[in-house]
Amino acid sequence: MVTGSRRDDPARQHTTSPACPSTIAVATATLYNLLRRATPSRQGAFRGHDEQSHIPCAPLTTTSPRWLVPMAKPKKARQQPAPTAVPQEQSFVHPRPTGAVWTYLPLWLLVAFVLRAAVALAGDFLLHPDEIMQYLEPAHRLVFGNGVMFWEHYYGARSWIMPGLIAGVLWLCALVGLDEPHAYIAVVKLFFCALSLLIPLGMYLFCRRHWDERSARLALVLGVFWYELVAFAHKPMTEFVAAALMCALLAVMPLHAPAQAWRWWAAAGVVGALAVAVRFQYAPLIGVILLVGVSRAPTTGRLAMLGGGAVVVCAVGALETLHWGMPFYSYWGNVVANLGLDEIRVGESPPWMMSWQLLHASGGLLAVAAAGVVGHVRRRGFVLGLLVLLVILHILPNHREYRFIFAAVPLWLMVFADVVAVASERATPAGTWIRHAGAGVAVLVSVAGMFNAIPGQNGIYKSFSKESSHFNFLRTHDPGLQLYRRLSEDDTVHGLLDASAEYETTGGYYYLHRAIPFYDRVMWNKVAGDHAPADYFSHIITRTSAGGGHDVTAREVNGNTVRVLKTDYGHERYPAFIADSDSGELVYWSNPSSRRPQPDYVMVDQAGDLVLWKRQPAHPVKQWRGYQISTFSSPDTVDFLQRIIFGHELPDPPPHHGIAFVDD
């Protein structure tokens, strides 16, 4: 009889510390109880085997916690057969037989979806500009006709698979009348939240087939609640979608009953090929999983898997040929572009950076998972090996960002779940302590991460190229996207200048959704020059100034020394529109000695450090013939792309950045 456990002492079962009024404390306590119960002690253990001693665990009984007992009609008690001995160490290539899945699996997936949807709909944050400029904006341009075009999609350095998928969702939204930003943005977010459920589902199915039900249930709960899986679920980026497809592939590879399961082998080929098509940088990782799985497949299984993969490959090749005139052109273009950019990123970040970021974001739990492989290489080594391979693949290039190795998160979570589950199986004080400590630390890290309270957490997600924007998960969302949402519902907006940012860090037409002239702080100066602002836009977004906008400093920009204005956010290059914090008026600085107030514009809204100005009274604005802007039409940009990125002559870009005025 083990003493010192809460289950053994009824007087201690409901003894808790005083309730904390803070949201973090309440969330921590709730999640801790869920995780603690997902790794039951000996009295409530699943029927199976102790990994080290081969002692059968106690079966589920009516005395077990109700949440562990499958929902079924009461049956007459009968003698349970003795469990069949199984090998001490289960490996990836020798999975154990499995029965019916956990009765509460759909309920946990519903909880996962609700959590992800709540974060997605709570507000907007940009993890990286690629989210809008490479995926959402091209999809919006494809469906609604207006959008900003970036060089990657014009010269074939990005696949249309992700924008095409999003465009399909937007087209369906428009078909049923959900063609306003407040509606279709929510639908797209919820679509990717649903797609992300493949991660906790795949974690559960993999663990129960290759380890045991105890590890699978803890992995499922971790997959449901872990903050990174929740916060990034709605992001339409290739890293996150490919990670979901990888987990789905792990759930079915390798397969049992190979002679009768050719459909599953075909499905595995389809899923694996889709993962590579979405993010081809994961090809070696997916290839290892498929090779290990196919090594056990019969001839029919191998043919089915090859056939499933071939269908996807042919479909992708046909899509590329239809758009670019050559199969897989964008994949080749992406490789060439990345190799060209890699040369100018030398020294940008140290090779060990992503490994440290992964350890940092895990709150140190990654080290526990890695230590758990020692002595259990056959059981857990394959999963950790996939993680190591993923990291190595992404530390070789000079461009390193944490989001590139997002697929490592579910991998180490599965290993951590198995380590805690096996250790807590032992009916000893140490096993109880491990169970409580593992659940407690996982809860603390996850809740702290969700509230962006892990020390140095923001530095993990900000890329070294300084392109990242606001990324608080639950609070202080991106002020620019807030203003764009409001502008999309304002019928008095006839032209917009976002003087606070460049196109890649704005909400784009995806958030604006109005067929109006739309300038960023660079395009305005190229198109309008020194002309009157009122002729070009009715609304302006600016940042507030520091010291009345008079703090002028010299700064090196792209190798040239320029004069810049200091603002509350940082520095603005001349010419610039600034909200003068001293006078409260909009000021246009065309050069360090030219301060031109704009009294016709009045402040109508503010979000964070951004101010929205409106022309009063209304003034006619020069309209465009079409609303598809190219950001790369300047000779300097084209020359850079030809010499540094692609290394050969490129087709001419759209003239005048694709802008043609109706009156011209």
Image (tube, rainbow, N blue to C red):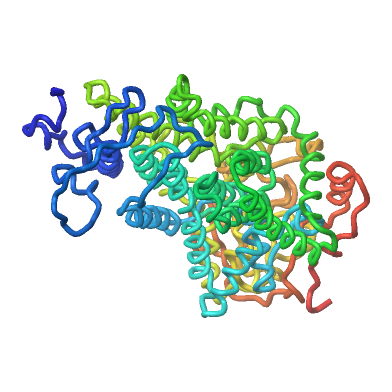
Please identify the quarter of the rendering in which residue 405 is found.
Answer: top right
- Residue 610 percent across, percent down from the top left: 54, 53
Relative placement, left or right, of 105 versus 253 is left
Position of residue 644 relative to residue 315, above or below, is: above
Which quadrant of the figure has residue 144? Answer: bottom right
- 596 lies above or below 440: below
Task: Give residue 343's position: percent from left, percent from top.
Answer: 80, 34
What quarter of the picture does the C terminus occupy?
bottom right
- 387 relative to 589 in the view: left or right: left
125 vs 550, left or right, is left
- Along the line of sight, the residue nearer the viewer: 161 or 510: 161
User: Is residue 501 in view?
Assistant: no
433 to 47, vertically: above or below: above
Quadrant into which the N terminus falls: top left
Question: Up-down: is 310 above or below 45?
Answer: below
Residue 157 in sight in this render: yes
